[in-house]
Image: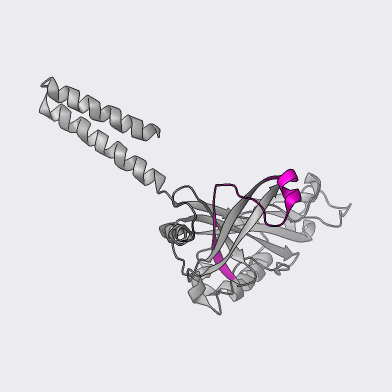
Amino acid sequence: MVMIFASLYLAQVVRWLCNQRISRVVSIVLGLISFWVINASESYAQKCEVDSGFRGTKYDYRDNNRRTIHKFNQLPLEVRAELNTGLLARVGAGFFHRLTFAWGYAFDLDDTPRLTPSASLTEFADAYDLVFYFSDRANGLKGYYFKVMLDAKGKITDDVSLPDLASSPGKAGLISCKTAIAIANTLGFPGKRSSVRFDFNPETKSFIWIVTDPNPTTPDDEPLLLIIGRGTYRHVDIDANTGEVLRIYKQTIML
């Protein structure tokens, strides 16, 4: 809205300068600025940069039982080797190179009393809780973050929220965020004000775009939710690879 008012103001300035017979060069320059402001406001309204995924930790331990890992090469070599083998088996070589290490934690789960602050990660860690991400900015995905849980040797212990891209590499191809919004718009979701998230659907084992209608609605057959809830909103899950509409549903934000 501020951008629109600014463009209108600049347009008035340009007309005033022309009426005052100020230099044609100045008028042209201000006209170009006005044109840029208008287009910038339109492109801002259409901006689609989705940043999604889980960033929490599985374990809740005191700081002396947890060490932060800032860089991938801080992990012991044998842990890195086992982890890479597991990720390659899951996503294949092509997609593997798109994965980026974000951060992680090493945990001393048994609270071994003999450990000192100078103990190596190999001595310290009983488990690793790591966060990775990948991007597809061309399709509006700034970053999708996911967890990778490891044992002390680096073997993946929990399911990773990624499709089996090693077997189905085509699932890595995404429709754009704007395409997902356009699909949702055909279902009655607002085109410009809807919010969008990106996630992994364990049932279809594929990536999905989740479009949310910002307008509150009433819950289905749940009168109690009207009292204790903080609002009910419509969502639509869209297969991020095929564009198929998987489901339309309502969710209530609880107190």
**Residue in the picture at 45% in, 65% down:** 175
Count the marks. 0
Question: Is residue 226 visible in the rendered structure shown here?
Answer: yes
Q: Residue at x 17, y 23 (%)?
A: 17
Q: Is residue 198 magenta?
A: no
Name which quarter of the figure residue 52 lies in: bottom right
**Which x, y percent locates residue 247?**
58, 66
What is the image's colouring?
one colour
For the question of whether residue 101 can be seen, the reply is: no
User: Which residue is rendered at x = 11% and y = 24% of the image?
Assistant: 23
In the figure, 185 relative to 166: above or below?
above
Residue 70: image location, x then y, percent: 62, 50
* Magenta highlight range: 206-230
Is 205 situated above or below 225?
below
Left or right? Give the position of 26 relative to 230: left
Could you tell me which residue is drawn at 61 percent across and 50 percent down? 217
Q: Report x, y in % for residue 129.
A: 70, 58
Between 110 and 244, the one lying in front of the other is: 244
Q: Residue furthest bottom?
A: 167
Image quarter of the C terminus: top right
Frontmost residue, 138 versus 251:
251
Quadrant for the N terminus in the image: top left
Q: Is residue 55 left or right of residue 109?
A: left
Q: Is 171 rendered above or below residue 34?
A: below
Residue at the outermost right position: 113
35 above or below 17? Answer: below
Using the image as rendered, state which of residue 244 and residue 155 is in the foreground: 244
Residue 219 colored magenta?
A: yes
